Image (cartoon, grey):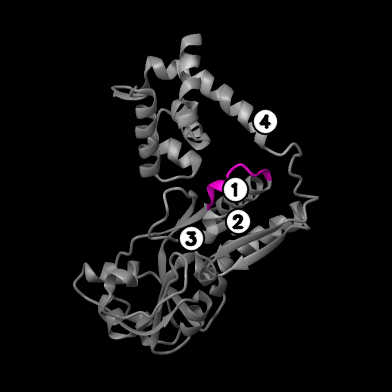
Amino acid sequence: MLCIFGIFLMNIARVDLNLLVYLDVLLRECNVTRAAEELGISQPAMSNSLRRLRDLFNDPILVRTSDGMTPTDRAMELKPLVRKVLSAAEQTILPKTKFEPEQSKRIFRIMASDYTEVTLLPVLLAVLRTEAPNIRLDIMTPSDVSFHDVERGKVDLVINRFDSLPQSFHQVHLWDDSFSCVVNAENPIVKNWNLQSYLAHKHVWVSKTGMGVGVGMTPDDVQRLGWVDEALSKLDVNREIAVFTRHYQAALMLGEQQHLIVTIPTMATRSIADNGKVAILEPPFAIPRMRLKMVWSPLLQHDPGHRWMRQTIKTVSEQILL
C-alpha cells in the first residue's frame, strides 16, 4: 500500500482535481454512463477521462466482464487513496461556512428561454419565496449570453435545449417534452385533423436553441429548423412557415389566428389551457421529444450556494413532472 501511495504522489503533478473526482465516481459506480450522469458531464467526456486515467496509471482501471465493468486490483488499491486525497482537498478549498438559503441575499444569474420561464420559473419562485425569500434571480435571454460567459462563471446556470455543448461543462437533464399543436378553436381543421389538413395551413416556427445572437432563418434549411421540420422531411413533406419567432409566448398568442398552426413543446401550452379561443391538439405525425438541460461552469461545481440552487431546480423539475 505504501508503494502504491508513493507512486500516486509522484504522479500527482500530472493530475487535475477534476480527473481525481472522475476516478472516484467511476470506481464507485463501475459504469461510465452512470458516472457521467452523477457528475453532470457527457458520456464522451467521461470516456475520455477514463482513457486519461488509464494512461496516467498504466492500468485499465475498469475492465468489461460478464458482471459488467469491474475494477482492476490496481484500481481497488487506488480507491481509498483517491478518496483520502479528495476529502483533504474539499476540506481545504471549500468555504468553512455552510450555505444558509433562508439568510442568503445572493443573486443568481440564470439564462433561460421563455419556454423555461413559463414552465419552470413560476414553481421555482414559489419554492424560493418559502425557503430563500431574500435570494434574487437575474433572468437572462439566450441572446444575452455566450459559452465563454458560462465558462468564466459570469452566468450561474443555463437552462435550455442544446444541439451541442462544450465537454468541459457540467449538465443535468431536467425533463423531456412532447409536442402539441395550437389552432384557433373555431378553425374547421379541428374536426378534420390529419397530416393533409396540417400541411394545407400556414405555420408559426418557434425555437431558440443554444446561446448567442440569433441569425435569420430560411424555410429551406431543414437542419437548422429543428425537430418538427426534420420529422416532416423524413415523410418527404414540408410545411409552409409564415412566421419565424424566438418567443414561445408570442407563438402561443399567434395560435389564436384563424389561418395559423403553432407546433410547440407541450408543457408550454399549460399556460393557455383555459383559453377558449384555441384548441390544443396532438400532432398528426411523430416528432422526437425535446430535452431540457441545466448547464454550468466547472468553476462553480463545488460552490455550496450553487449546489443548493442546482438541487432545488432539479427537485422543482421533478415536482413539475408529477
User: Where is residue 163 shown, x and y percent of the image?
Assistant: 38, 60
* Residue at x-position 65% and y-position 58%: 124
Please name the residue that numbered disc 1 is placed on: 300
Please, which residue is most extreme toward the bottom here?
258
The reply to whether residue 111 is visible in this rendering is yes
Please name the residue that numbered disc 2 is placed on: 156
User: Where is residue 80 shown, x and y percent of the image?
Assistant: 53, 18
* Residue at x-position 75% and y-position 39%: 98
Q: Is residue 300 magenta?
A: yes
User: Where is residue 248 shown, x and y percent of the image?
Assistant: 50, 75
Highlighted magenta segment, given as a residue range: 296-304
> Alpha-carbon distance for marks 4 and 3?
30 Å
Please name the residue that numbered disc 3 is placed on: 147
Choose the circle earlier in sequence order: 4 or 1.
4
Classify mark 1: helix, strand or loop: helix
Mark 2 is on which residue type? Asp
